[in-house]
Amino acid sequence: MENSEETELEHMVLAPYIQKSTALRGKHRYVGGNQFRHALSTFAILLDYHYMDSVLLKASIIHDLFEDVESVSPEEIIKIDADGSDVYQLVMEVTHGKDESKEEFLERIFIKGSTNAKILKCADRISNLTDLHTDIFDRAFILRYIDETKRWILPMAKEVNEDMLFELKDIIQKRESSMKYKPSFWPMKRKGN
């Protein structure tokens, strides 16, 4: 992290957003862990790419909150700080609506989403793809998820961040390769047995 980034991060009001995100601790993920850790992973991915936009970073911490927790109100987020209203708006851009299919949701972000919504969705997908293990998810699900990523997320990444595009393609290639090759582990025999 560069000194200027450290200074920017030091002055951001992040703790109340992290506190709100702790409501995701009880929301388990198929890969293990919980949605709270996924939110912080998404935040870390954005930091890794040197994003210092306070609204983007705060939104990343709570990006799944309204999908997974019913007890949080918009007003709770809006009143947190001066960024609250913008953070809420960005979170709602990347929130899968109950009346939307997954295809409609991703198409909406791709066509109508702000630059920050697309950046956040790319970071979210990097985190999700990293957790997409072939020993946990069935082959059909992985192939659908990869196809969805190629169709919607790669074009978003191409538009907003070429480095994210490279990472997404790399993860996809690794997941596709791991499905083609399943190593066999044979017990080793000791010499003399």
Image (cartoon, rainbow, N blue to C red):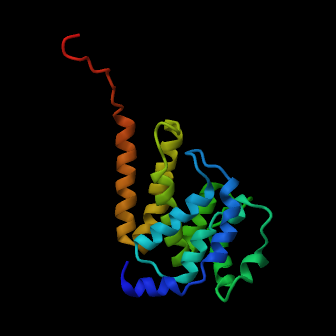
Horizontal and vertical percent position of residue 141: 54, 42
Q: Toward which corner of the image does residue 80 lie, by quadrant?
A: bottom right
Outermost residue on the left side: it is 192
Q: Toward which corner of the image does residue 167 lie, by quadrant?
A: bottom left
In which quadrant will I find the C terminus?
top left
Q: Residue at x 40, y 88 (%)?
A: 4
Horizontal and vertical percent position of residue 107: 57, 64
Vertically, is 62 above or below 141?
Answer: below
Vertically, is 2 above or below 122?
Answer: below
Report the front residue among 88 and 111.
88
Side of 166 relative to 64 (left or right): left
Q: Residue at x 40, y 45 (%)?
A: 175
Horizontal and vertical percent position of residue 186: 31, 21
Report the front residue among 42 and 118.
42
In which quadrant will I find the N terminus?
bottom left
Q: Toward which corner of the image does residue 49 lie, by quadrant?
A: bottom left
Outermost residue on the top side: it is 193
Side of 91 relative to 164 (left or right): right
Q: Residue at x 38, y 43 (%)?
A: 176
Horizontal and vertical percent position of residue 151: 47, 57
Side of 171 relative to 31 (left or right): left
Vertically, is 84 above or below 101?
Answer: below
- How many numbered circles does the render carry? 0
Report the front residue among 69 and 162.
69
Side of 26 relative to 121 (left or right): right
